[in-house]
Amino acid sequence: MTKAANGKTNTRNASAGNGALAHPEQLRGATRTARIALIGCGYWGPKVIRAAASLPEVEIAALVDRELALASQVQRHFPAARTTTSLSEALADETIDAVIVATNPATHVELAVEALEAGKHVLVEKPLALSAADCRSLGEQAREAGLALMVGHTFRFSPAVQHVRELLDNRELGQVYYIDSQRLNLGRVRSDVDAIWNFGPHDISIIQHWFDARPVAVHCHAYDYLQPGIPDLAFIVLEYDFAVAHIQLSWLSPNKVRRMTVAGSRKMVVYDDVAGQLAIHDAGIDREHLGRSFGEFQSFGEFRLIQRSGDMHVPRLPHVEPLQAQCRHFLECIFSGNEPLTNFEDAAGVVEILEAASASRANDGARVELGELAGV
Ligand SMILES: NC(=O)c1ccc[n+]([C@@H]2O[C@H](COP(=O)([O-])OP(=O)(O)OC[C@H]3O[C@@H](n4cnc5c(N)ncnc54)[C@H](O)[C@@H]3O)[C@@H](O)[C@H]2O)c1
């Protein structure tokens, strides 16, 4: 067993001894090359495969989409890759080590199961599945087979997100009061998932990483202006027993906004992903004891609230493309046998919150306790 950076216990290495896990040496000999198939050549798949292909250890072996023309378009950049419309056909190539699934979320489980059954390591785009129970059953399958199963919670690989986690670990922000997160844009309007399931995995995976805790309850109000029954605007509240997080998601905003604020008693942080900036404000409201003797107090515990608006610090962070770092981590897990940081448990934690948000939304924003959900 190994301890992951987040302090959680990894078990994948423990199963490496059962012979099922493809060790580095088994992957294309001593050169440590991984041959990868991509399924899903729509909007996001080509971006992921470009990031994967920028790593010297990667060979793009196959490009799969049920619309062959989309796979052929991507093939122009990777002429050595074969194109096909079905994963089964691609998996017939035994030299393929791993599959990246970048299809519509409703297809993730079926395709990941097929790839794992064929003995391939799998990176699945977010959300891993549409239920936490499915995330866990996929995870069990991967563990039994000794294969890497990772979910594409891309922002977990952002240096800014990691820096905020360090600030929180070191208690530099003091007591954390709340997180406020906005992820807004004009489109891309989807019809297979709503804005909650499309954008929400990003904010929730970041907040879960920062707080390293499970919310007690979820409230969600959501509105469908564009397509009946498919919310394009959502306001989600996650109640933790020590703080609160608010998330606003929208496909109907004139501006692209990806901004998260963490308000602590000592410092406040604003992470603006669009501007590429993390700002740490020495700001807050302090309680100053008025210094009177006990007899002079008008009321018990008399204090003055003083505004503190000090310097702003912008830390120098490494220039890392999160998507490339995500692909690199996937490779490292394949080669080392380590459990991915964004493993099925991480994915299930995100998906159970999305399920609770949908349940709340269906019940006019009612408070849904996570324990109330079946299978949670
Ligand atoms: N990490 C991120 O920042 C990020 C950003 C955007 C999208 N995504 C995720 O990427 C995934 C794909 O999103 P998208 O925007 O590219 O969607 P998309 O609709 O543009 O593309 C999906 C593609 O998958 C193909 N497909 C679906 N089912 C298939 C099957 N069974 N066999 C073969 N091909 C199949 C479709 O033909 C389509 O071309 C989603 O899970 C989405 O949440 C992640």
Image (cartoon, helix red, strand yellow):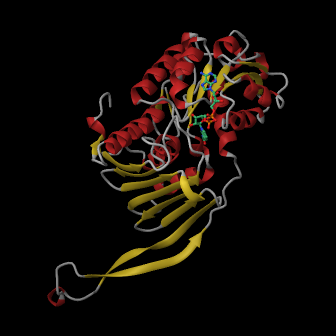
What residue appears at the point 47 percent right and 39 percent down from the top-left corner? Answer: 7
* Residue 365 at x, y percent in the picture: 31, 49
Residue 113 percent location from the top left of the image: 53, 17
Q: Quadrant of residue 369?
A: top left
Picture coordinates of residue 189 (x, y %)? 57, 44
Which image quadrant shows ligand 1?
A: top right
Above or below, comparing residue 172 to residue 213 in the picture: below
Q: Is residue 247 left or right of residue 31?
A: left
Q: Is residue 12 visible?
A: yes
How many numbered discs sit on the rendered protein?
0
Q: Nearer the viewer, residue 256 or 245?
A: 256
Q: Quadrant of residue 150?
A: top right
Image height of 175 relative to 326, above or below: below
Of the pair 105 and 169, the residue shown nearer to us: 105
Instruction: Say which quadrant the C terminus sits in.
Output: top left
Q: Position of residue 372 (x, y in %)?
A: 26, 36
Most extreme residue toward the left is 295
User: What residue is drawn where x is 78% and y is 36%?
Assistant: 54
Q: Is residue 163 visible?
A: no
The residue at the point 44 percent across, 64 percent down is 263
